[in-house]
Amino acid sequence: DAGVIQSPRHEVTEMGQEVTLRCKPISGHDYLFWYRQTMMRGLELLIYFNNNVPIDDSGMPEDRFSAKMPNASFSTLKIQPSEPRDSAVYFCASSFRDTEAFFGQGTRLTVV
Amino acid sequence: RKEVEQDPGPFNVPEGATVAFNCTYSNSASQSFFWYRQDCRKEPKLLMSVYSSGNEDGRFTAQLNRASQYISLLIRDSKLSDSATYLCVVTPGYSSASKIIFGSGTRLSIRP
């Protein structure tokens, strides 16, 4: 298996634009997590899914953020409209039950 | 109070030294515990799981204290390559629709 695959690796966008981050989890994993990491706030859990169903989105900063998981092999995190304070590294991770979580390489988002 | 708390460091120690980190958690029902390592500009990766009886992997020893709700990581004979950020991870367990919570990390720098 290729591991968790995220795209794009880097994204630079202008304030106000829509940004879509993509994630392909490891096949067979039933949990998918979206995290955001900044120097100031560390690694924050935004939302997680179990069997494609969102379980807890209490970490999503505000209504500008939305996440979907239409099937077991794909998830998106969308920011609309984007703001400079959204600049961060966004990680997707997947796991099987409560075993080890495997991370993608992250998407480095810069909003100017 | 944060669900998982760590001393952010940085810990700056000479090569060959022994260094220890602690991590406290607030949910007494937590079931699974891990230590992850994150190198600069990389994704977090599993270092080791933490078992109730404590466990050792080479120079690394992990301990769990359920009564006081903390986990620890001990690194003996530290190497330059141990320089990284160490994240403790806690999950409530599969029966609770696991939510993997990361501490904000402890930065370790090993000097020659």
Image (cartoon, rainbow, N blue to C red):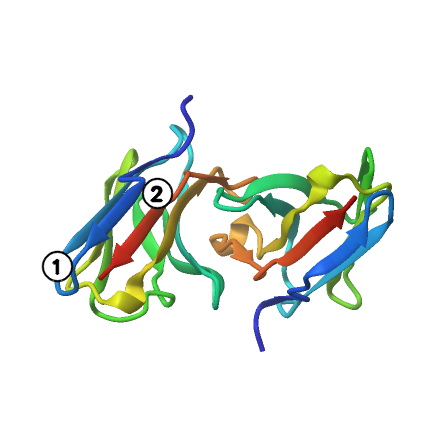
Q: Which residue is mark 1?
A: A17
Q: Residue at x 41, y 38 (%)?
A: A104
Taking the image as shown, residue B54 lies to the left or right of residue A92, namely right
**Chain letter behind tag 1:** A
Question: Considering depth in this image, is A92 or A26 the residue closer to the camera?
Answer: A92
A36 or A49, nearer to the observer:
A36
Q: Relative to residue B43, is residue B91 depicted above or below?
A: below
Question: Which element type, helix, strand or loop, lies under badge 2?
Answer: loop
Tell me the amino acid under the disc marked 2: Asn
In the rendered image, the residue lying farthest to the bottom is B1
Residue indicated by mark 2:
A51
Which residue is depicted at the point 64% across and 65% down? B8
Q: CA distance from mark 2 to mark 1?
A: 30 Å
Please tell me how crowded label 1 is: few (under 14), some (14-19), or many (20+) other residues with Cα within 10 Å.
few
Residue A108 location (% of width, % of height): 34, 49
Q: Secondary structure at mark 1?
A: loop
Residue A76 appears anywhere in the view = no
Which of label 2 and label 1 is nearer to you? 1
- Indicate whether B5 appears above or below A2: below
Check disc 1 and give the amino acid type. Answer: Gln
